[in-house]
Amino acid sequence: MTLAITPQLPPADAVIPTAENKGATKANVDYQSFLKLLVAEMKHQDPTNPMDSTQYVSQLANFSQVEQAIQTNTKLTQIMQASSLAQADTIIGRTVTSPDGGVSGVVTEVKLGATNITAVLKDGSEVVIGPGVTVK
């Protein structure tokens, strides 16, 4: 009996589930499922026609590569978040102007979104930090 096992996600370190790390928790579940399938495949193979051991090694190697790629992406995400925090810290107390020049003021607060940084000005208006925004 030959089963083609293609892992969906690699394992992740144990994490407390949050909105931001739901994928990591799912990855851990998928890793456990993959191992269970692999063990079941080994237990139930036909002894008169065993699966080629190179197929097992190939599956494990592919899974390991995917696992490493996901871990690298996780680390890069952490680095990007740290960079965003550093960038946010540098604009507090400075004057920002929107690309069209319609909104301008001193930054009193910074909001970090999933994909952007928003500067909150003294008057309560907000400017998304991005291309064309002037910071003085």
Image (spheres, rainbow, N blue to C red):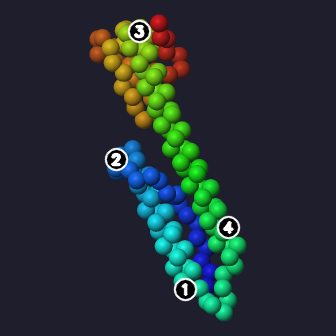
- As measured in the structure, the alpha-carbon distance from the residue carrying label 2 to the one carrying label 3 is 33 Å
Dot 3 or dot 1: first in sequence order is 1
Is 82 left, or right, of 58 in this rendering? left
Which residue: 54% across, 83% down?
43
Mark seen at residue 58: 4
Residue 40 drawn at (x, y percent): 51, 79
Mark seen at residue 14: none
- As measured in the structure, the alpha-carbon distance from the residue carrying label 1 to the one carrying label 2 is 38 Å
Residue 3 drawn at (x, y percent): 59, 77
Mark seen at residue 44: 1
Which residue: 55% across, 64% down?
7
Which residue is labeled 2 in the image?
Answer: 18
Q: Amino acid at mark 2?
A: Thr
Q: Amino acid at mark 1?
A: His
Is 83 left, or right, of 119 in this rendering? right
- As measured in the structure, the alpha-carbon distance from the residue carrying label 3 to the one carrying label 1 is 67 Å
Is residue 54 visible from the viewing direction of this image? Answer: yes
